[in-house]
Image (cartoon, coloured by chain):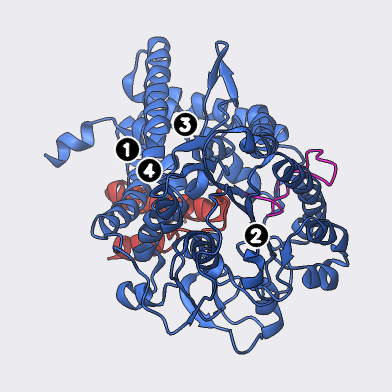
């Protein structure tokens, strides 16, 4: 049996599958299994076609398989090698410069394989190498999916709190459109001033002049987008869930994912006749929202035989790791930029739609890597990362661009909405600073404090803003809105600030009292 | 045993990165995995060709001893 397996030449398929599974596995907490279908099918099919073509020339199944495997390996490893060699900041320069040595090594391999005599050993080598890697990635994915299967979304994870009862419940009986605009990693004004030397007063004053309440001591409840957003949209903390499921992110993450996609805020409003509209953020968890009635999607990325190809977030990011990246990287990045601009334009048009709308618009702005400068001109995202000086340098430009666009959106929404809408402009957490302890398990109090200092601006017409307060945190946003505008009876929870770091995103440190 | 240890090391590098609102190519992890995969493949190669390697070494030693 083992001998028979050894005789099978399957390594081209293994090489075609592994890089996709690796990329998925590495980013698994932000992705859904469905995204794998098209890339895997295309990769396997493409490899088989290439294999057949080469076989027609060489007339040797083993040799053609070795050449195809090496080609596929080089093809999918392109950006990894490029980044490993230092990327754009190294002597290598642009990605195009790697193509020549790449092509050279492929030609050498072709010559070697053509002269090779011990093909059996080479075939076994080429099989073992990707097989081991594939088993690791696949087992990681399987264990993650098994955990997901075993989890159920809690019926309602809100523990009856000891919070304060909101007065004035149900004072406003008019149904209004609700806009929940999330500006990812947008810093609070005092942090902008202190760390970036930027005075954000003009933008905040614009909002105030237009009736917004700015919570000057606002903090995020959680340090990561997927936790923070899920908490806000489910009106709850995760203390109970963590004690039940543990702090390992692989276990709890799928549950959060489900909670985000079936969030209570959307469910509550849907049951009251609202249409839920989600704007494609170009980030897996909020790219499409399962509970949304409408998921905006601009299917313009690439064309194939003049037919538009809808390339999702996963495929777009993955393609940039391949040898195609020198040719399509800019197109893909431009499509992401177009999507942001398109969403900002569409957002301003929502008031023209009939019926009551609950809009969830998550923008990866000014989150690094910055796609734009302050005038909306594209910026090379390569090598920006999150905590780098390069990212910090571009952050302000992206923030200024965001300000400009949000001003236009707010003006249009306010001008064309009747009755007056409810608008929440919130960031899920503070900025990615360059302090050495940023993103570590035990940051200084100052660093943690800045990371948790978010933007919270509310337009709550007809007296709703009277319930707001300086130190409000996002967990209470929809509690206040539902109480005041829908006569709900949610208690206002204590405003907690839970810091965590990347390697243990669910191991929360309660910083509430220290950073008050 | 060595293979098991290497697989465990390999598994360490496949742990997903934290969700940071952008997909990371994971270049460092990929390269490390490829290197470890290569080591495993080379170990296999040595195991497969062990007889030929030892024979080759023996012949080489004999050749030098004869010469001296």
Which of the two labelled residues, at mark 4 and mark 3, occupies the earlier sequence position? 3
Which of the two labelled residues, at mark 2 and mark 3, occupies the earlier sequence position? 3
Give the x, y percent position of residue A89.
Answer: 77, 49
Label 2–label 3 contact, CB within 8 A: no
Q: CA distance from mark 2 to mark 4?
A: 63 Å
Q: CA distance from mark 4 to mark 3?
A: 11 Å
Say left or right for B34 vs A347: left
Local SS, label 1: helix
Check the image and report above or below for A266 versus A168: above
Q: CA distance from mark 1 to mark 2?
A: 78 Å
Identify the subunit bearing mark 2. A
Disc 3 target residue:
A72
Label 2–label 4 contact, CB within 8 A: no
Q: Nearer the viewer, residue B13 or A351?
A: A351
Magenta part, dominant SS: loop
Local SS, label 2: loop
Q: CA distance from mark 2 to mark 3?
A: 62 Å
The magenta region covers A363-382
Q: Local crowd at mark 1 within 10 Å, few (<14), some, or many (≥20)?
A: some
Residue A130: which numbered mark, if any?
Answer: 4
Q: Is residue A116 visible?
A: no
Identify the subunit bearing mark 4. A
In the picture as drawn, the residue positioned furthest to the left comes out as A1
Check the image and report above or below for A323 versus B28: above
Chain coloured blue in this rendering: A
Identify the subunit bearing mark 1. A
The nearer-to-camera label among 3 and 1 is 3
Disc 2 target residue:
A462
Disc 1 target residue:
A121
Which of the two labelled residues, at mark 1 and mark 4, occupies the earlier sequence position? 1
């Amino acid at each position: 049996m083992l001998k028979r397996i050894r005789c099978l030449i399957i390594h081209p398929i293994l090489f075609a599958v592994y890089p996709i599974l690796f990329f998925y596995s590495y980013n698994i907490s932000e992705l859904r299994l469905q995204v794998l279908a098209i890339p895997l099918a295309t990769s396997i099919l493409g490899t088989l076609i290439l294999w057949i073509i080469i076989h027609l020339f060489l007339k040797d199944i083993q040799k053609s398989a070795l050449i195809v495997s090496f080609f596929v390996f080089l093809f999918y490893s392109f950006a990894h090698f490029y980044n490993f060699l230092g990327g754009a900041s190294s002597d290598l320069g642009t990605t195009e410069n790697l193509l020549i040595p790449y092509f050279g090594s492929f030609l050498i391999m072709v010559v070697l394989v053509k002269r090779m005599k011990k093909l059996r050993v080479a075939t076994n080598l080429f099989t073992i190498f990707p097989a081991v890697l594939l088993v690791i990635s696949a087992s990681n994915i399987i264990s993650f999916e098994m955990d997901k299967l075993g989890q159920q979304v809690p019926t309602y994870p809100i523990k009856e709190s000891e919070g304060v009862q909101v007065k004035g419940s149900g004072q406003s009986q008019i149904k209004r459109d609700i806009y929940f605009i999330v500006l990812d990693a947008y810093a609070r004004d005092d942090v902008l001033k202190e760390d970036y030397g930027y005075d954000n007063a003009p933008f905040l004053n614009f909002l105030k002049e237009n009736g917004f309440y700015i919570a000057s001591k606002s903090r995020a409840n959680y340090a990561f987008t997927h936790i923070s957003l899920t908490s806000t949209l489910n009106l709850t903390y995760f203390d109970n869930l963590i004690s039940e499921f543990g702090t390992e992110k692989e276990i709890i993450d799928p549950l959060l994912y489900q909670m985000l996609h079936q969030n209570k805020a959307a469910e509550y409003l849907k049951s009251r006749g609202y249409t839920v509209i989600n704007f494609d953020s170009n980030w897996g968890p909020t790219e499409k929202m399962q509970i949304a009635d409408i998921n905006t999607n601009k299917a313009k990325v690439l064309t194939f035989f003049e037919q538009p190809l809808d390339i999702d977030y996963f495929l777009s990011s993955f393609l940039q790791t391949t040898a195609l990246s020198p040719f399509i990287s800019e197109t893909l990045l431009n499509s992401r930029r177009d999507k942001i601009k398109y969403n900002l334009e569409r957002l301003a048009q929502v008031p023209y739609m009939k019926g009551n709308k609950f809009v969830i618009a998550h923008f990866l702005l000014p989150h690094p890597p910055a796609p734009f400068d302050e005038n909306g001109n594209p910026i090379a995202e390569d090598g920006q990362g999150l905590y780098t000086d390069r990212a910090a340098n571009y952050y302000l430009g992206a923030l200024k661009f965001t300000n400009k666009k949000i001003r236009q959106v707010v003006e249009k929404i306010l001008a064309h909405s009747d009755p007056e809408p409810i608008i929440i402009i919130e960031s899920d957490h503070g900025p990615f600073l360059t302090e050495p302890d940023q993103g570590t398990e035990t940051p200084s109090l100052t660093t943690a404090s800045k990371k948790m200092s978010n933007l919270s601006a509310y337009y709550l017409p007809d007296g709703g803003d009277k319930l707001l307060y300086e130190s409000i945190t996002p967990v209470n946003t929809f509690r206040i809105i539902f109480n005041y505008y829908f006569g709900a009876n949610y208690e206002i929870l204590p405003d907690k600030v839970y810091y965590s770091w990347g390697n243990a995103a669910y191991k929360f440190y309660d910083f509430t009292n220290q950073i008050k | 045993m060595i293979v098991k240890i290497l697989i465990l090391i390999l598994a360490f590098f496949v742990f997903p990165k934290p969700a940071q609102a952008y997909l990371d190519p994971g270049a460092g992890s990929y390269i490390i995995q490829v290197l470890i995969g290569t080591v495993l493949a080379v170990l296999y190669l040595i195991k497969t060709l062990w007889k030929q390697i030892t024979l080759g070494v023996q012949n080489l030693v004999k050749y030098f001893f004869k010469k001296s």
